[in-house]
Image: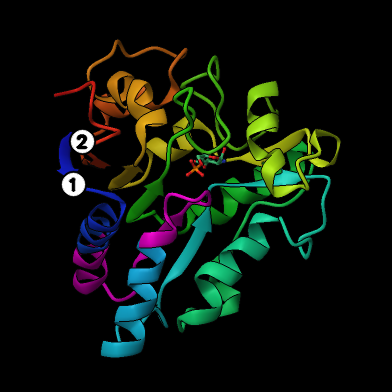
Amino acid sequence: MEVIICKDYDEASAKAYEVMKGVISAKDDATLGLATGSTPIGLYKNMIKDHKENGVSYAKCHSFNLDEYVGIDRNHEQSYYTFMHENLFNHIDIKEENVNLPYGDDQAACDAYEKAMDGYKIDIQVLGIGANGHIGFNEPGTSFDSLTHIVDLQEKTISDNARFFNNDMNLVPKKAITMGIATIMKAKKVLLIATGANKADAVYGLVKGEVTESLPASILQKHPDVVVVVDEAAASKIK
Ligand code: GLP
């Protein structure tokens, strides 16, 4: 695991883009594993900028997102489908037919997503991290053997996300569909970005803690190619 400590969010976003660019310049038809949340927005801004200014192309790329809410329409303003289009896909040349997000509320939808990914080994998986160490929507206690599955969101995750739903917890979806831990571990390379003091404990568990299902991200210690990009605040407990 390589850990890169940056001054702040902007520097971390630029560094994360360097890692991403290394992958897409080596392979113009790379398969990208993408994430939502506020953390990767800076990375996506750098991708858009380099595409617009220097023509870096995603025309041959495929993408697979980590997760999606269950129970809201894809076109809902807070769906991850909408998020990805607004923050990335609408501003680069990736083809709509090549972008994939999980969608559905049953095992058949989970199996279909795994099957879709089988044909495309993910070259780089972007991850954020929850304050409790979750990756995707794999909350503490999720089996390290899990594949794409439906999850009940924890109270904390629901309240953290209420800010996107008029601060009304009742409007926040209570379930999600997410790649599992074993799905994430299949990626060739993992790029995890964490910024802000509220991520410091999770980053400690990820980098230096025991490998335990109580802190899902800790499994990444066993992955052969992980780059963790953090800012000073998120790195405060690992120095
Ligand atoms: C959500 C997402 C995760 C994300 C996490 C942290 O739960 N499912 O993929 O990593 O939030 O979000 P943020 O980057 O906004 O802190």
Q: Which mark is residue 6?
A: 1
Q: Name the element at disc 1.
A: strand
Q: Name the element at disc 2.
A: loop
Q: Residue at the location (42% across, 42% down)?
A: 128
Q: How many marks?
A: 2
In what quadrant of the picture does the N terminus appear? top left
Residue 46: name its quadrant.
bottom left
User: Quick check: 156 left or right of 70?
Assistant: left
* Kind of residue at badge 2: Pro
Between residues 16 and 232, which one lies in front from this camera angle? Answer: 232
Q: Residue at the location (36% across, 45% down)?
A: 187
Q: Which of the colour schemes (rainbow, by chain, secondary structure, one colour) is used?
A: rainbow
User: Quick check: 127 left or right of 233?
Assistant: right
* Kind of residue at badge 1: Cys
Q: Residues within 10 Å of mark 2 (few under 14, many from 20)?
A: few
Q: Residue at the location (44% across, 25% down)?
A: 133
Q: Residues within 10 Å of mark 1 (few under 14, many from 20)?
A: many
Residue 149: name its quadrant.
top right
The boundaries of the magenta stretch are 20-42
Mark nearer the N terminus (2 vs 1) = 1
Q: Residue 31 appears at what percent x and percent y?
A: 39, 63
Q: Mark 2 — residue?
A: 224
